Image (tube, rainbow, N blue to C red):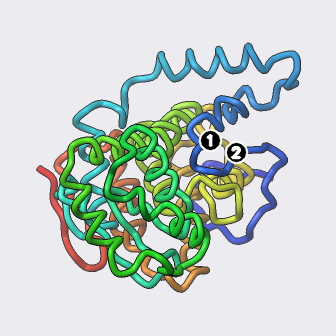
Amino acid sequence: MKRAGCLLIAVAPVLVTATVYLATPEHTATADAKNPASASRKAPAKESAEAGRKTDSEIVADAPPGLAAPDKKELAQEIVASAENSTLKWHEAYAYVEDIGDGQGYTAGIIGFCTGTHDLLTLVERYTEEHPDNGLARFLPALRKVDGTDSHEGLDPGFPAAWRHESGLAAFRAAQDHERDSVYFDPAVRLAKLDGLGTLGQFIYYDAMVMHGPGTSADGFYGLRERALREANPPSEGGDEKAYLDIFLDIRRAAMKSRNSWHDTTRIDTAQRRFLYDGNLDLHTPLWWKVYGETYHVP
């Protein structure tokens, strides 16, 4: 049974439904289009798939810009950067590359692409298709070999320097932007709009997509969302927006706490939860929040 519209703490994991999402980064941008997860998800697939896709597209088109508005998208990058790179100057993170000891190899770029989680490999592969002579192409064999591990085999000592050098080029910065949007930002915002969520809810989905990845496992974004939908109705199905987001954050926080490398949950506790409890569902500025003990302010 789903919860009533009140703010409660999630207590138990729930099995993911049979809805299938394509989990690999190269396909995630179209996952929800092929497997609609909006209010139309209950309709018979064969008879209503095409109609469902059209309806979803209309819902998204008719919704306010929300997080996709240029000023809100810039704000979203700043809030994410405060957690990913301890700065609001997200434009300076293109050249960032470091092994932060989380078991995912090198973390790099504007949203933390990782050598161990496939998205960095996909980024470099796509970039190399358009720019074959780039400085990262020679690392592709090694990137394929270490994919899914925390290994640096074949990457040291030259990969970090090559990443930083390539990030000085406008083409590679544009490639990072495109990968961020197609794999993380656009799918998260689209699905949040289909769930009836406003700007804050769209950001909460986006930040979860960035950190947890577009996977269907228990701690992947789609897995987290499926569990939340079993706990509460989203606004698109008549649920209370604040209560639904509170439950989604409960479930996400529990998933983070279950992993040693994600034990710090301040990006939820003293940032997103603060915005939610302040009733700032439209993510209006000015904003104050804390991550890892550091205070940030956007006027």
Q: Residue at x 74, y 15 (%)?
A: 50
In the displayed structure, 198 sits above or below 260; it is above
- Residue 25 in view in this figure: yes
* Residue at the extreme left of the image, as rendered: 299
The one nearer the camera, 113 or 280, is 113
Q: Residue at x 57, y 72 (%)?
A: 146
Residue 224 horizontal side relative to residue 115, left or right: right
Alpha carbon separation for disc pair 1 and 2: 6 Å
Image coordinates of residue 96 in percent, x first then y, are: 27, 66
**Neighbourhood count class around disc 2 (C-alpha, 10 Å): few under 14, some 14–19, many 20 upward:** some
- Quarter residue 223 falls in: bottom right
Q: Secondary structure at mark 2?
A: loop
Image coordinates of residue 130 in percent, x first then y, are: 40, 37
Q: Amino acid at mark 1?
A: His
Q: Secondary structure at mark 1?
A: helix
Looking at the image, tell me whether mark 1 or mark 2 is earlier in sequence order: 2
Residue at image mark 1:
27
Numbered tag placed on residue 75 in the rendering: none
Image coordinates of residue 40 in percent, x first then y, are: 73, 26
- Quarter residue 294 falls in: bottom left
Contact? badges 1 and 2 (CB < 8 Å): yes
Residue 170 horizontal side relative to residue 182, left or right: left
In the displayed structure, 252 sits above or below 195; it is below
Q: Residue at x 70, y 51 (%)?
A: 226
- Residue 3 in view in this figure: no
Q: Total label count?
A: 2
In the displayed structure, 159 sits above or below 212; it is below
Q: Amino acid at mark 2?
A: Leu
Image coordinates of residue 105 in percent, x first then y, are: 48, 76
Residue at image mark 2:
22
